[in-house]
């Protein structure tokens, strides 16, 4: 029972983050958004690193908000597990659907995805 | 730990508050909802035979609205901080700022939709238009619901003189919803507006 109380108390502790730290996090988020915007202006110069770069910055912002603003870093691991389950399922769904249906139909036929028309040898 | 938190404690088998748990389960299910809408958009965005495509985006305006939503997340977390530390004035002020920033974001979205409509892109123009408006419109509806939610929290805190026993929990749960709306937009802004045709 004492152990359960200890766990319960730990879950109800408020995050120790100060207002100053929250403002700093807000500044970091703004700077990352500004970097993303600048990156999207130089699409040709950045070439192949543009999309991975934007996705990485987006992921960093996502993690910062979830961990610090939604307090998952300080809260019960149960909440993290539940949210991660939904998020991973959604990401898997997105990947599967885009891979399955995102292949251009003309490429699919011409490139042999569907396969060459069956040749009949009469 | 504050006295307010002690009073709201109730033991559950998981050791967490059921109301907060319910919100996290709801948000996890919302991930799937937005995931399916986003995948639909990604499939259809390059498949239109007529009408405008992704070249219609003016992401300068969208960048400002993204900044507005990010700042609303900051004000929301400060409202939660105020509630948890018994600073009623800070909580009310930050809730009000969050609501105003949410309304500003919605204003930008209405402006964007009207601009697109005047340039020939509507819900029924092509597949890109349909999937784009459904995706961003659904997010906008979530922001609208969030604004109503936070307004109800603000009104109830104004009517009650002082921070009630369960106010920190209610503000915290409202904050979770608002931050979720923000992280959805973080993903949408990058995938829809910043990344060119893949």
Image (spheres, rainbow, N blue to C red):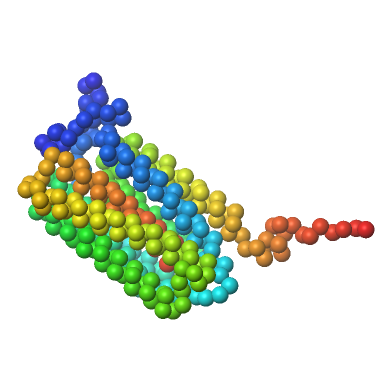
Residue furthest top in the image: A1
Tell how many labels: 0
Quadrant housing the N terminus of chain B: top left
Residue furthest left in the image: B161
Q: Can the viewer see residue A49?
A: no
Q: Is residue A94 above or below residue B59?
A: above
Residue B176: image location, x then y, percent:
28, 48
Residue A60: image location, x then y, percent:
36, 54
Residue at the image point whose x is 50% and y is 52% from the top: A94
Residue furthest bottom in the image: B119
State the image quarter where residue A34 is shown. Answer: bottom left
State the image quarter where residue B192 is shown. Answer: bottom left
Residue furthest right in the image: A122
Residue B178: image location, x then y, percent:
28, 53
- Residue nearest the viewer, comparing B3 with A38: B3
Residue at the image point whose x is 16% and y is 53% from the top: B154
Residue at the image point whose x is 47% and y is 45% from the top: A89
Residue B42: image location, x then y, percent:
51, 61
Residue at the image point whose x is 38% and y is 39% from the top: A82
- Residue nearest the viewer, comparing A109 with B112: B112
Q: Can the viewer see residue B15?
A: yes
Give the side of residue A47 with respect to residue A119, left or right: left
Give the side of residue B97 with respect to residue B50, left or right: left
Q: Is residue A101 above or below residue B23?
A: below
């Amino acid at each position: 029972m004492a152990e359960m109380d200890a766990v319960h108390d730990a879950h109800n502790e408020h995050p120790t983050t100060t207002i100053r730290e929250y403002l700093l996090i807000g500044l970091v988020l703004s700077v990352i958004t500004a970097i993303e915007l600048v990156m999207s202006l130089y699409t040709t110069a950045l070439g192949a690193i543009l999309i991975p770069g934007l996705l990485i910055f987006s992921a960093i912002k996502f993690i910062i908000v979830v961990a610090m603003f939604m307090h998952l870093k300080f809260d019960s691991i149960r909440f993290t597990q539940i949210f991660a389950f939904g998020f991973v399922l959604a990401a898997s769904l997105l990947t599967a659907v885009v891979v399955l249906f995102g292949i251009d139909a003309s490429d699919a036929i011409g490139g042999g995805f569907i396969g060459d028309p069956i040749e009949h040898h009469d | 730990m504050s006295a307010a938190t002690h009073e709201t404690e109730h033991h559950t088998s998981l050791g967490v508050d059921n109301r907060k748990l319910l919100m996290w389960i709801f948000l996890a299910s919302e991930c799937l909802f937005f995931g399916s809408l986003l995948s639909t958009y990604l499939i259809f965005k390059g498949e239109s035979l007529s009408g405008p495509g992704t070249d219609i985006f003016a992401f300068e305006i969208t960048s400002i609205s993204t900044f507005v939503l990010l700042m609303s997340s900051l004000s929301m977390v400060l409202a939660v901080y105020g509630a948890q530390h018994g600073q009623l004035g800070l909580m009310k002020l930050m809730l009000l700022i969050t609501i105003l920033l949410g309304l500003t974001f919605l204003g930008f979205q209405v402006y964007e939709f009207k601009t697109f409509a005047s340039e020939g892109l509507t819900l029924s123009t092509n597949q890109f238009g349909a999937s784009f408006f459904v995706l961003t419109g659904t997010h906008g509806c979530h922001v609208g619901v969030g604004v109503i939610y936070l307004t109800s929290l603000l009104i109830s805190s104004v009517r009650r003189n002082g921070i009630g026993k369960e106010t920190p929990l209610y503000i915290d749960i409202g904050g979770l919803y608002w931050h979720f709306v923000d992280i959805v937009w973080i993903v949408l802004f990058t995938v829809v507006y910043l990344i060119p045709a893949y």
